[in-house]
Amino acid sequence: MGESKTAFHEAGHAVADCRLGFVCGIVSIEPRPGTRGHAVHLSEDGSDDDLIIALLAGYAAAVRAGGDPVQEKEGAWSDFERASEILERTGRTDLAPHLARAETFVRDNWSAIERVAAELIEWRTIEGQELEVVLEVADGNATDADLARFRLMSRASDSRQRGEHG
C-alpha cells in the first residue's frame, strides 16, 4: 500500500468515525510498527454496526482510490479481524452486508475522504479539532482560509503551552 492509498485508507476511517458518531482523536500516515498509518477514535459510543462500518471504510476507500482489492485487504487485515470479532461477539458472522454499507458510505462521503487524504499527504497527521475543520471545508461550511487560521492559531497555542518564543 503506497502513501496515497494509505492516506485514503486512513481518511476513510477518520471520516467514518466523525460522521458515525465516534470522536476521532488523530489520523496519521506516519508509520508505526506493523502499520503504515492509523486513525484513533476516542469513543465507541456508537452502535456495533457503525463501528464495523468505520473499520471497513478504510479498506473501501483505498479500493475506491484505485487499490487492488486483494492487496488492500491484506493491508487491512487487522480491521477485518476486529470487525469479525465484533460480529462474533454479537452472534453474527457475515461481513458482506457491512462491507456493502461501508462501500456505500465511502461513495456518499467521497469528497470529504478525498479532502482528508489530500491533507494527510501534505500534513502527515491531523488531530481531532483540525479534522473537524477539514470536514467543514469539504462540506462547504468553511473555507481554506478558515482552515489556515485554525492551524495558525493551534500552532501558536501549542508554542505557548510549551513555553516557546518566536
Image (spheres, rainbow, N blue to C red):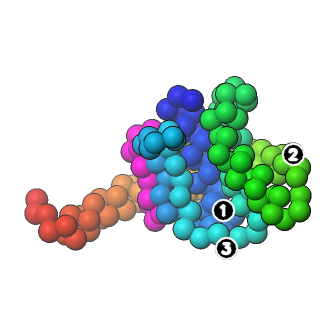
**Residue farthest along the left direction in this orientation:** 165
* Main secondary structure of the magenta stretch: helix
The circle on residue 35 is none
The circle on residue 45 is 3
Tell me if residue 123 is in the magenta stretch. Answer: yes
Kindly identify which residue carries mark 1: 19
Q: Nearer the viewer, residue 108 or 58?
A: 58
Tell me if residue 144 is in the magenta stretch. Answer: no
State the residue at coordinates (36%, 55%): 148
Query: Whole-Å distance between the Cαs marked 3 and 2?
Result: 23 Å
Q: Which residues are magenta?
A: 121-131
Is residue 149 toward the left or the right of residue 70 in the image? left
State the residue at coordinates (67%, 73%): 45
Q: Tell me which amino acid carries mark 1.
A: Arg
Query: Whole-Å distance between the Cαs marked 2 and 1?
Result: 21 Å
Q: Are marks 3 and 2 in contact (CB under 8 Å)?
A: no
The disc, 3 or 2, on the residue closer to the chain's N-terminal end is 3
Disc 2 residue crowd, few under 14, some 14–19, many 20+, Cα 10 Å:
few
Q: Is residue 138 above or below residue 61?
A: below
Q: Tell me which amino acid carries mark 3.
A: Asp
Labels 2, 1: front one: 2
